[in-house]
DNA sequence: ATTAGCACTCTATTTATTCGAGTGCTAATT
DNA sequence: AATTAGCACTCGAATAAATAGAGTGCTAAT
């Protein structure tokens, strides 16, 4: 749970970060004088706004946080912060609200390094996780549910995909005269079932011998190898099965977009920013349809950074997510299996907590995945 | 929109329907004089309200539906209908709105018998359904999605459960030294996987012989039979596996509440009755948490009626569903496997369409399930 | 039994008014 | 030069009053 995002304190010329700050990079360096005091004020504004969801006034900043300066001074600083784009005004006589850029700065440089979940919380989660032996999809569903509850936001979990799925074992079971159930076990312990309709009836014995033969010949191969291997086989049942096998293995590949498990959608409805029904509808549609995620998840899977990734509001290239922030972590085993666990909520979210949660859960899932491997 | 309403016309004394009318039965018979005209007016009010979501005025009833009577007459009838509880008034100067009882009456006696989906629709659905070979859980997910889209409401599908799950075949696959993957195939073609941690390491060969033995001894048995059968076995690996097997088979039993697949939640957000954010939140929580369904579904599974069941608004014993109607159908094979497919929407829903949809999808799922059986 | 006519009710909409939170600026202060 | 007190000004939110019109319910006429 170490923080690989350790605050290299961005000063005027210091700018060689390769990490997340998307387009922000240059702007941040351009920023003239981000004095300590100004940063402190920005931090307070964000903290306060995250808690109260109400624009923050200069008075609040001073009094609630006992700053040894006057509101007027704060107002001046605020004006500057606004000029630099870190905060905005809903209207003249309202307090300040952090902008996406403000949040970004906060996440990069201001936030107390996410310290991880508290021990009791970790224990609760572990408890829920290891209570029963479950199937993989139930694990994932559970993971989504726990994540949502812990972060008090919506959660998404994508099923793990392998970079190079290899066959470990297959079984053929007769279901009806011309119908067989093909069970595929991959080297990382994934089980996939598929119905296969056969050209002609086979007894269970025949099926058994076919599967024995296939097991012997194809063990440890990935889909493309299997494809080549059986290219010149005669057009018989074994060949048919092999074809189906290839299809299935392909489906398990990291390049295929995988099942997404969602939970806690109603959590974000409870946030005050979603008291506008139109917005809610749009958001719900996005989250349910999931088109945005099928785009964003592969992106995270193939990113070179391995840490937690934070997408704040408008930074999202996906219009539908403009009003939301997404915190994503990869889980799995480097170069072998990978999936994504994430949190979706309003831009006004507790980034620290979200990051900790996602980190912890991804850790859990990773160990789960490695347990399953041979 | 032709009116071929060939109602079975429930008249004053005519009351020997054995069907769905829950507590309604007596009330309906008590009702003095439900003349044809009054029924017609009620039908119109419901139809109109379903379409427009606005209280229906006497004028609308007369003019839009070209009735050869005057608005004043309609008003009189309306007053009576209201007295009998079929419709209400939001306030004095508003039109009429159907009550739960009104909808119930409509569904029982007024609705044109659901004629089923149109052929093109049926074909579209079939097309989506049979396009790819999928795993059972993907089928169910797909079913939920199709149902939601077809009925323009939220959909729920529960995974099929067997009344008496019997083992067809099991496989044991070595994953790690002390970890084996147990794959269970039941007689209805369900595949269930489970990790089993072993007391001591076993080679794949040993595992193979254990599973062969178990297969020979336990084939065709249900969980309780297996339990008895292995009661006096020695405390070895085979016994361990058998215990796990029993657990798993139990889980597949109809008495366990099963996975629920949901889709189209956002559809019902688009209904105008949910322009109130508080309501939306409550509803979403209900639908996501699903506690109401885990209660209502077993109930439907064990009902003796085999048709489509309609729960209208306040008839629901589950407070959370007060504002919603639920249309449910069982699918599966009588006495062997069963699951539920349903539609959830505002009480103001197109019951005819919902019923047709649910019927058709349950039919699809039934045939799917029977295909999988030996 | 039906209907025309009309008074009456109640909501939704609009407009005006007020209140106050919070800023931005200027001039005084340190 | 930085800070701050003081104050005018802005703008939204809340409240109140006025208006329009949709739709009913009742009565009396047909």
Image: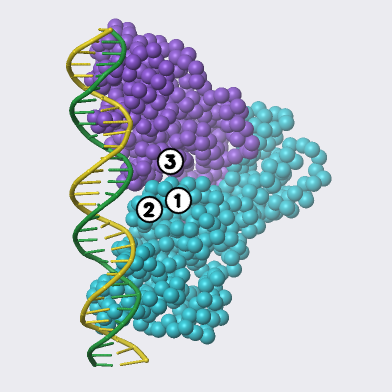
Chain colours: A cyan, B purple, C green, D yellow
Q: Are marks 1 and 2 in contact (CB under 8 Å)?
A: yes
How many other residues sit within 10 Å of disc 2, few (<14), some (14-19) or many (≥20)?
A: some
**Mark 3 on the same chain as mark 1:** no
Q: Is residue B58 left or right of residue B171?
A: left
* Residue shown at 45% from the left, 36% from the top: B153
Residue A370 in the image: above or below residue B57: below
Residue at the disc numbered 2: A274
Q: Chain of mark 3?
A: B
| Chain of residue at mark 1 | A
- Quarter residue B38 falls in: top left
Indicate the chain on which mark 2 is placed. Answer: A
**Could you tell me which secondary element the residue under label 1 belongs to?**
helix
How many marks can you see? 3
Residue corresponding to mark 1: A283
Which element is circle 2 on? helix
- Residue in view at x 60 percent, y 27 percent: B120
- Say whether residue B115 is visible: yes
Residue at the spot 26% in from the left edge and 83% down from the top edge: A68
The correct choice, above or below, for A121 with respect to B196 in the image is below
């Amino acid at each position: 749970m170490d923080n690989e995002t350790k605050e290299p304190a961005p000063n005027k010329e210091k700018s060689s970060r390769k990490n997340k700050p998307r387009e922000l990079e240059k702007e941040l360096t351009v920023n003239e004088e981000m004095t300590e005091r100004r940063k402190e004020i920005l931090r307070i504004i964000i903290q306060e706004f995250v808690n109260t969801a109400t624009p923050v006034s200069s008075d609040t900043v001073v009094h609630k946080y006992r700053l040894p300066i006057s509101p007027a001074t704060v107002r001046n600083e605020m004006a500057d912060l606004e000029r630099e784009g870190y905060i905005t005004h809903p209207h003249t006589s309202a307090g300040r609200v952090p902008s996406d850029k403000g949040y970004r700065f906060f996440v990069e440089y201001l936030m107390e390094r996410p310290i991880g979940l508290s021990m009791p919380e970790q224990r609760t989660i572990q408890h829920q996780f290891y209570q029963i032996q479950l199937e993989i999809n139930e694990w994932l569903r559970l993971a989504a549910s726990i994540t949502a509850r812990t972060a008090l936001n919506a959660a998404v979990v994508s099923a793990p995909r392998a970079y190079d799925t290899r066959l470990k074992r297959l079984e053929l079971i007769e279901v009806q005269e011309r119908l067989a159930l093909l069970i595929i076990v991959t080297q990382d312990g994934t089980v996939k079932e598929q119905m296969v309709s056969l050209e002609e009836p086979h007894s269970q014995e025949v099926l058994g011998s076919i599967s024995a033969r296939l097991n012997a010949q194809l063990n440890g191969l990935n889909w493309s190898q299997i494809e080549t291997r059986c290219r010149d086989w005669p057009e018989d049942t074994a060949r048919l099965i092999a074809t189906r096998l290839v299809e299935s293995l392909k489906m398990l590949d990291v390049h295929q977009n995988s099942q997404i498990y969602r939970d806690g959608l109603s959590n974000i409805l409870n946030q005050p920013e979603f008291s506008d029904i139109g917005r809610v509808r749009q958001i719900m549609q996005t989250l349910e349809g999931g088109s945005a995620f099928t785009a964003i998840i592969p992106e995270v899977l193939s990113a070179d950074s391995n840490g937690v990734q934070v997408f704040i509001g408008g930074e999202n290239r996906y219009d539908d997510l403009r009003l939301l922030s997404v915190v994503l972590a990869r889980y799995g085993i480097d170069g072998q299996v990978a999936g994504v666990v994430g949190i979706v909520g309003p831009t006004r979210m507790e980034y620290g907590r979200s990051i900790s949660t996602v980190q912890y859960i991804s850790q859990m899932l990773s160990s789960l995945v490695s347990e399953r491997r041979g």
